Amino acid sequence: MSPIAVQPPGGDVPPAPPEVVEVSDESLQELVLDAPGIVALHFDAPWSRRSQEVGVSLPLLAREFQGHVRIARVDADVYPSVANLYGVTDIPTILIFRDGVELGRLVGLRPYAHMLIALETALLSPPGAESMRG
């Protein structure tokens, strides 16, 4: 007999894996804005199929860039003030920060390779370089 898959109650998105940091109103400053180096912040919502597709890539990116890039997510439905602060109106959106300053954003469903290139570009660009928009 095969194991039965258990769906979370209410169809909610399961919590992010340990290598993906959960961000809230209270932790935004510490985990993103005061964090040294590159942070990729994924805005998602449990109702967004595209957001769930991007979410599958987050642990892969976290492992790929371990020690170099912090991968984080915020539920835009639970913490709309964070989304409003950055003018995020489309889900999914990934904001890329360096030392708390937004470098660029990826809006909508993007292939893994595109996310990978955006993070590599952020790592390789010198501090103070012009922002990248995707």
Image (cartoon, grey):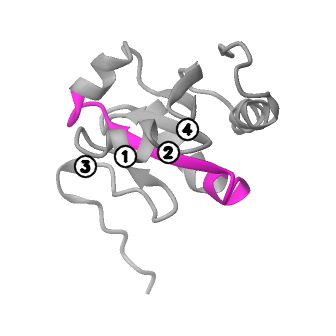
Which of the two discs, 3 and 2, labels the residue nearer the N terminus?
A: 3
Q: What separation in Å lies between label 4 and label 2 (alpha carbons)?
A: 11 Å
Residue 122, picture quadrant: top right
Q: Looking at the image, do the residues carrying marks 3 and 1 touch, with CB atoms under 8 Å apart?
A: no
Q: Quadrant of the N terminus?
A: bottom left
| In magenta segment, residue 70 | yes
**Residue shown at 65% from the left, 55% from the top:** 60
Q: Looking at the image, do the residues carrying marks 1 and 4 touch, with CB atoms under 8 Å apart?
A: no
Which of the two discs, 4 and 2, labels the residue nearer the N terminus?
A: 2
Q: What separation in Å lies between label 1 and label 4 (alpha carbons)?
A: 14 Å
Q: Nearer the viewer, residue 9 or 4?
A: 9
In the rendered image, residue 130, in percent from the top left (x then y), is placed at 71, 12
User: Between tags 1 and 4, which lies in front?
Assistant: 1
Classify residue 31 as left or right of residue 79. right
Which residue is labeled 3 in the image?
11
For badge 4, the amino acid type reads Ala
For badge 3, the amino acid type reads Gly
Q: Looking at the image, do the residues carrying marks 3 and 2 touch, with CB atoms under 8 Å apart?
A: no
Which residue is labeled 4 in the image?
40
In the rendered image, residue 63, in percent from the top left (x then y), is placed at 66, 60
Q: Looking at the image, do the residues carrying marks 1 and 2 touch, with CB atoms under 8 Å apart?
A: yes
User: Between tags 4 and 2, which lies in front?
Assistant: 2
**Residue shown at 70% from the left, 38% from the top:** 112
Q: Which mark is residue 63?
A: none
Circle 2 residues within 10 Å: few <14, some 14–19, many ≥20: some
* Helix, strand or loop status at disc 1: helix
Q: What separation in Å lies between label 3 and label 1 (alpha carbons)?
A: 30 Å
Q: What separation in Å lies between label 3 and label 2 (alpha carbons)?
A: 32 Å
Which residue is labeled 1 in the image?
30
User: Between tags 3 and 2, which lies in front?
Assistant: 2
Q: Please give the range of residues in magenta.
A: 61-80
Circle 3 residues within 10 Å: few <14, some 14–19, many ≥20: few
